[in-house]
Image: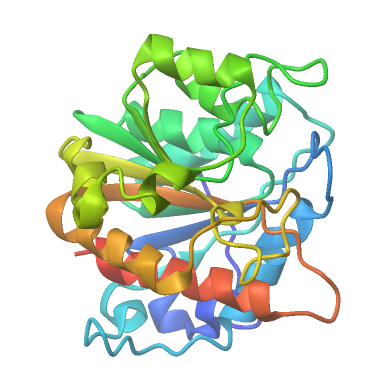
Amino acid sequence: MKFQTYDIRNNFLAIEENVSDYKNSKIAILPVPYEATTSYGKGTSKGPAAILDASHYVEFFDEEMNRELCFEKGIVSVKEIEFNGKKGKPALDLIYKNVKALIDDGKYVVTLGGEHTISTAPIKAHFDSYDYLSILHFDAHSDLRDSYEGTKYSHACFAARVAEFTKDITQVGIRAQCKEEYDFIQKTGINTFYAYEIRNGKYGNNWRDKVISKLKKNVYITFDVDYFDPSIMYSTGTPEPGGFLWDETLKLLKEVGKKRNVVGFDVVELAPQKGDSFPDFLTAKLIYKMLNYFVR
């Protein structure tokens, strides 16, 4: 499969061709501006472009990890997927085809949403490519409804579709769900670390270790930005109070990177607001931090 790529004007981090060409880059950024079922705030289709634009102001050097990853590994930004009217399963099939082709080409794939519906496809592509794979799901919502507003391919159902091929799912930060989802978790044994339980000390001071203990050797991460508290992430469709902050989140991500092999990830549900670039920049920096933690 031949991919077209973005140049320095539009690629991730605005890096030169010698560290962003397809052949020599280990990491591939795949923008997926899919939005079909958002039910409250809108605008996730603009998320990938906003992330790429904001990334131009993220520093190349990570002082915590003492590395310039983009120069060390190379990061190619392939052009966004065009859906041409495809929705639901046909759209997911198209995303799957693109992600799987990138994996088969030896790339470390980062998928940018778009609404959370899209995540089923890259998760399945990685599930089909790696043994002993666990899914680590950061979110305010459990997204385990069997269907929502007349479709099984809603942002509120993506994890239910994932659960059709693996129940090895660990969720962190959940603080909004319906009774159907709660019952599904109890029935299937999906590992859900509710925000209120973490805050109330159920897991003690080592709650991060408890999360990591649920994960197999290989891990795929799906990260909905509404996992964060609205005080730092308000550009998202359904912000929920009681979320998590930057430092405590990075501490967990860094530990996951140390103790497990994170094979890929997606970041979804950024809905940019005109004239307010902070959430866009936070998301771009989050992605680069995750890459620094995970790519060896």
Q: Nearer the viewer, residue 177 or 159?
A: 177
Q: How many marks?
A: 0
Q: Evaluate whether residue 161 shows in this view.
A: no
Q: Residue at x 26, y 44 (%)?
A: 211
Q: Is residue 98 left or right of residue 48?
A: left
Q: Position of residue 23 (x, y in %)?
A: 37, 63
On screen, residue 260 above or below 232: above
Q: Nearer the viewer, residue 97 or 207?
A: 207
Q: Position of residue 29 (x, y in %)?
A: 50, 60
Asked where in the image residue 171 lies, by quadrant, the reply is: top left
Q: Is residue 178 left or right of residue 244?
A: right
Q: Position of residue 234 (x, y in %)?
A: 71, 65
Asked where in the image residue 95 lies, by quadrant, the reply is: top right
Q: Evaluate whether residue 291 shows in this view.
A: yes
Q: Please identify the residue farthest to the front as the structure is shown.
A: 200
Q: Please identify the residue farthest to the top as the structure is shown.
A: 187
Q: Residue at x 44, y 59 (%)?
A: 28
Q: Nearer the viewer, residue 66 or 29?
A: 66
Q: Residue at x 40, y 82 (%)?
A: 18
Q: Position of residue 46 (x, y in %)?
A: 77, 60
Q: How is the image coloured?
A: rainbow
Q: Indicate the quadrant containing the C terminus: top left, top right, bottom left or bottom right.
A: bottom left
Q: Residue at x 75, y 59 (%)?
A: 271
